């Protein structure tokens, strides 16, 4: 069989497999209901809480709506319920509670609440699991609008039609294709990575663009369509800074309430709230207040790079979405570049399959998804800081030629990238210290700390001096100190000026940031927050600052346990000369976690501060272990499973309820389509 015929045969097999899964898994309930005998004419059916007109029902305000069917005397296999009105919207849904009797319950048994979604046909069938025959059924409804007339259809034991979803078949086929491409026996693991090969380069570009598409699609789903509404005023902070700069000063052109200036401690949240309410005033939250004026404590670099140029060109405000997307694309590019550089330099036998799989895992494990799920100003400094950090490290890694010489252009580009972090997310500028493990003692002393190395040293030092002096001058102009970035003056839900250092915070913080497992249940979307805003339950007797929390790093990225193999791989890592690089990366993660715990508290987005550094160590240890244990450079089943799990979990948790901007709020129709048309096979519905 020639190659083309083999490819065609593989495609045919994938399509057949997708169709079989569509028929026998996703349409299982339709097959199950083939023998059902529908009951549509009832001896007794009563609509309470409604007024009826020509077969249409209008809810009576402040009255419970219910439909009660009596004298059924039959087994109820399912309840079909359709609720719609003249202009049914895609986001509409109606909570439903079934109350039934059966041979085990002569009085009404109340079942778990569920919902009917008019635009999702699969949701209209409520599969019941009762004992013997039922006599009575009562359906409680809610979320109905008293100003609308509804058409309500009820029947029992209705045969479900086959619902073939082309998008679902395409998705199944795509997943099967990925499994085939990256399964244990895939030919990709027998192809040595070589991007000089045009076919390999094209293959990698396709996956890079696919990753970009995934991130852009997620951003389009979760980003509010109207960003200048009052609800999103907080996202204008960078625009306020740009406007202030154009007006020739560094404070924001926002009026400060008079009572705020008179307070002894304006950062005391409860006292500030009380006084402002008494005076009928309000403050703009999450601005820095200092010496009677508002400032932005966010780093100024995004303003200089994005907002100020845009305002100069258009005279208008810039939507924060676009700078975030630019930073995310840079991060994705830097991830592919970084992984290729490390493979080429230290793991020359790396396969094409391992490269793409581990790069994808590195990206998702670095929690970059948060940036596109929550496209607000709070994401931008971390997104810009991490993308610049990884880009700068990649520049420096590529600054060393095979002969040990240094490329000055790469040195300068890396220094500029990393120096700019000081104006984004200052403590992420710790990435600068990667310079020592990257270049090593020999190069540091011969190519930097020597007379001949002065130009090389200047390539690194000068960008930091220029950016550093600029940032310090900006700090001094605002707060009278070159080292004061203003974060402690933030008008937020607690007093950051008196945050203090309390060692006992570390235990709770490390647990939540690293080891906290998910809160799971049998109800879609199966994962819920472990703590709501400022609602973390703990024995710690002190103020706990937290935003909604889902789980720690290892819950999102179980593959991180591979760092435990560091000791087993120590000998090989020393030979390759990258042990200091890995240890430094792990140290950075530990330091950043500690800083976040003490300075602010616990929030999901701060996982993006440090996860990248843990993932650097993880993927490099995996590459080392695979090379050490498998001379043929295959990849073990366990690594494939952990990589797939890491990517899946990070994507799936985007739907978790309770987090900021959950999918239920961002796109309710998509939420229910996923629940009933994609994940419905997991449910008794």
Image (cartoon, helix red, strand yellow):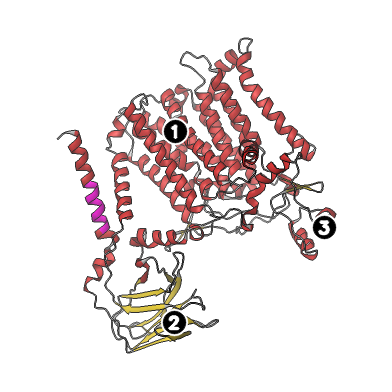
Helix, strand or loop at label 1? It is: helix
Distance of label 2 from label 3 (alpha carbons): 54 Å
| Residue 465, quarter of the rendered image | top right
**Crowding near the residue tagged with mark 1, few <14, some 14–19, many ≥20 C-alpha atoms within 10 Å:** many
Q: Earlier in the sequence, mark 2 or mark 3?
A: 2
Distance of label 3 from label 1 (alpha carbons): 53 Å
Q: Position of residue 199 (x, y in %)?
A: 32, 29
Which quadrant holds the C terminus? Answer: bottom left
| Residue 80, quarter of the rendered image | bottom left
Residue 79 makes an appearance in the image: yes
Mark identifier at residue 336:
1
Q: Position of residue 650 (x, y in %)?
A: 46, 48
Magenta region, mostly helix, strand or loop? Answer: helix
* Residue stretch rendered in magenta on the structure: 13-22
**Crowding near the residue tagged with mark 3, few <14, some 14–19, many ≥20 C-alpha atoms within 10 Å:** some
Judged from this view, the residue extending furthest toward the left is 1
Image: 16 above or below 365: below
Mark identifier at residue 447:
none
Q: Position of residue 225 (x, y in %)?
A: 53, 54
**Crowding near the residue tagged with mark 2, few <14, some 14–19, many ≥20 C-alpha atoms within 10 Å:** some
Helix, strand or loop at label 2? It is: strand
**Residue labelled with disc 2:** 57
Image: 423 above or below 38: above
């Amino acid at each position: 069989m020639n190659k083309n015929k083999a490819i065609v045969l593989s495609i045919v097999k994938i399509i057949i497999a997708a169709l079989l899964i569509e028929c026998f898994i996703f349409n299982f309930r339709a097959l199950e209901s083939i023998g059902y005998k529908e009951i549509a004419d009832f001896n007794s059916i009563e609509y309470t809480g409604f007024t009826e007109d020509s077969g249409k029902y209008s809810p009576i305000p402040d009255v419970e709506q219910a439909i009660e069917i009596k004298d059924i005397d039959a087994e109820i296999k399912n309840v079909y319920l359709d609720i719609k009105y003249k202009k049914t919207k895609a986001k509409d849904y109606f909570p439903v509670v079934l109350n039934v009797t059966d041979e085990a319950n002569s009085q009404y048994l109340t079942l778990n609440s569920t919902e009917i979604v008019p635009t999702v046909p699969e949701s209209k069938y409520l599969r019941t699991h009762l004992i013997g025959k039922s006599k009575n059924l009562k359906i409680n409804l809610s979320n109905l609008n008293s100003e609308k007339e509804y058409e309500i259809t009820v029947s029992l034991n209705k045969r479900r039609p086959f619902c073939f979803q082309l998008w679902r078949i395409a998705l199944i086929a795509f997943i099967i294709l990925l499994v085939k491409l990256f399964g244990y026996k895939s030919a990709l693991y027998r192809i040595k990575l070589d991007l000089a090969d045009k076919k390999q380069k094209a293959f990698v570009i396709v996956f890079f663009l696919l990753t970009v598409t995934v991130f852009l699609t997620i951003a389009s789903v979760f980003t509010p369509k109207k960003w200048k509404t009052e609800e999103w005023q907080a996202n204008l902070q960078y625009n306020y800074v740009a406007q202030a700069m154009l007006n020739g000063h560094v404070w924001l052109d926002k009026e400060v309430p008079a009572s705020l200036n008179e307070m002894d401690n304006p950062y005391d949240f409860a006292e500030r709230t009380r006084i402002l309410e008494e005076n009928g005033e309000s403050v703009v939250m999450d601005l820095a207040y200092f010496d009677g004026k508002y400032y932005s404590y966010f780093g100024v670099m995004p303003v200089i790079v994005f907002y100020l140029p845009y305002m100069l060109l258009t005279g208008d405000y810039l939507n924060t979405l676009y700078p975030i997307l630019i930073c995310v694309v840079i991060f994705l590019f830097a991830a592919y570049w970084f992984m290729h550089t490390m493979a080429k330099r230290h793991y020359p036998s790396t396969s094409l399959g391992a490269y793409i799989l581990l790069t994808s895992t590195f990206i998702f494990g670095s929690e970059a998804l948060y940036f596109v799920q929550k496209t607000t100003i709070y994401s931008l400094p971390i997104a810009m800081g991490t993308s610049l950090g990884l880009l700068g490290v990649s520049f420096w890694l590529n600054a060393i030629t095979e002969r040990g010489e240094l490329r000055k252009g790469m040195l300068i580009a890396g220094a500029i990238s990393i120096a700019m972090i000081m104006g984004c997310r200052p403590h992420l500028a710790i990435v600068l210290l990667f310079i020592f493990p990257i270049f090593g003692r020999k190069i540091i002393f011969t190519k930097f700390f020597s007379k001949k190395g002065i130009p090389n040293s200047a390539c690194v030092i000068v960008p930091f001096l220029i950016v550093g002096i600029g940032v310090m001058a900006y700090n001094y102009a605002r707060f009278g100190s070159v080292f004061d970035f203003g974060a402690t003056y933030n008008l937020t839900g607690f007093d950051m000026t008196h945050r203090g250092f309390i060692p006992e915070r570390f235990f709770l913080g490390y647990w939540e940031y690293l080891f906290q497992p998910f809160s799971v249940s049998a109800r879609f979307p199966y994962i819920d927050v472990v703590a709501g805003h400022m609602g973390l339950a703990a024995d710690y007797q002190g103020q706990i600052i937290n935003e909604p929390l889902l789980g720690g790093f290892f819950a999102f990225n179980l593959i991180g346990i591979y760092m435990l193999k560091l000791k087993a791989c120590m000998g090989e890592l020393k030979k390759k000369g990258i042990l200091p690089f890995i240890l430094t990366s792990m140290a950075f993660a530990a330091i950043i976690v500690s800083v976040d715990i003490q300075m602010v508290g616990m929030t999901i987005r701060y996982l993006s501060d440090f996860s990248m550094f843990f993932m650097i160590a993880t993927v490099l240890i995996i590459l080392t272990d695979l090379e050490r244990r498998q001379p043929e450079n295959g990849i073990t089943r366990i690594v494939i499973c952990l990589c797939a799990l890491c990517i899946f979990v990070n994507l799936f948790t985007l739907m978790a309820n309770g987090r900021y901007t959950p999918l239920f709020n961002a796109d309710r129709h998509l939420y229910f389509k996923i629940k009933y048309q994609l994940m419905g096979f997991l449910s008794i519905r």
